[in-house]
Image (cartoon, rainbow, N blue to C red):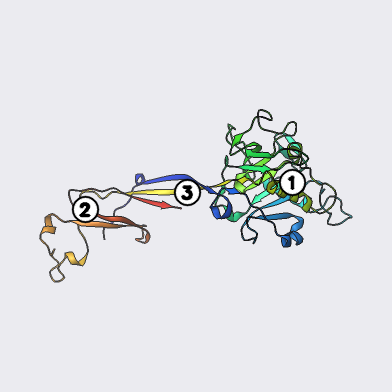
Amino acid sequence: MSFNRLETDDFVVSADSITAGLFTDSRTATLSTFFTSSTQTAASSGDYYLNVFSDAANNQLEFAIAYGNKEGSGSEAFDSAVVGKSPSSTNYGQYRNLVLGDENADFSFGGITASDFYAISIDRNRYKESLFPGSLTLELSGSDGKPVLSLTDNSQVVSSVQFNDAGRVFQLVSGSAGSVFTGVNSNGYSENQGSYGFFLPDISTLLLNPLAISESAGIVPVTANNDNAANYELIYNAISGSGAANFVLNSSETITSDFIFIRPRSSQFNYSENPSFISGSTGEVIYSSFVNNPQTYITTVGLYNDNSELLAVAKLSKPLKKDFTKEALIRVKLDF
């Protein structure tokens, strides 16, 4: 067995971004069928969120919808003697800690402070790393005579990316597939009510601004102290309603590859330690032609550490002929 120590310039690291359809086991980027489970809605978790599936058998969970309100409005209080503590305030506090990292901070959508939001959280099984900015199209059917509202993120038009405790932050604006619609005004926001919310690709979440949504699509939050389900069902009906039923989104994954260049020089790896090369009794090379003009075939590259422990094995697609008149360059790719 022959060894050759690798040098620093034999290693090159490369990173590639791979995109894929988000929904239904990454087979498609478009979700157009929506189902809910009455069992989940009736359970205790139904006070906090609504699971949305792509099939009637409820085998493919796609995303969940929740409603958060800073004052606890929109859901029944845990204790009538404690004002403002309810499932909606719990949701608000959880997302505030996750996104803003400050229990005293307020959500500001496009410069407009909002005391509540709708949250759409993509199921973790739908993607490997994060959502893909610029691929979003979320259509909401309007109420009270309002037209269908199409939303996307503004990742394609911003000059710099904003970050918070949740990672990258993009504003939700009117448009589709990353193309901002400027018919409302120059930045795609709802007039006087800020952006339509946040697109948070690193935690696979969309936060919708009820102020802007109600103005453009007529979807008004229910703030009376009743079942929180009334609010997330508003968004579910808007997504699955007539004229909309169109949710498009891709996932993104960064694949890091380590390229290792193996360089057998003309004077290297021309002899074999295979017993068929050498006489077992005399130790001489059996075939005289292999003495001055040996030929070998490289079929496998093994990567070892300094303790001679085998770490990885690379197989060539076909044997590579090697002799004193030939040099080779073998590129080994490690993905992780």
The quadrant the N terminus occupies is bottom left
Q: In the image, is 124 to the left or to the right of 285?
A: right
Identify the mark nearer the N-term, 1 or 3: 1
Please name the residue that numbered disc 1 is placed on: 103
Residue ID at (55%, 55%): 25
Instruction: Give the x, y percent position of residue 222.
Output: 81, 47
Please name the residue that numbered disc 3 is placed on: 255
The amino acid type of the residue labelled 1 equals: Glu
* Residue 96 can be seen, yes or no: no
State the separation of the CA atoms marked 1 and 3. Answer: 35 Å
Q: Nearer the viewer, mark 1 or mark 3?
A: 3
Q: Quadrant of residue 115?
A: top right
Judge by depth and name the residue closer to the eye, 173 or 298: 173
The amino acid type of the residue labelled 2 equals: Lys
Q: Residues within 10 Å of mark 2 (few under 14, many from 20)?
A: many
Instruction: Give the x, y percent position of residue 322.
Output: 21, 53
State the separation of the CA atoms marked 2 and 1. Answer: 67 Å
The amino acid type of the residue labelled 3 equals: Ile
Q: Residues within 10 Å of mark 3 (few under 14, many from 20)?
A: few
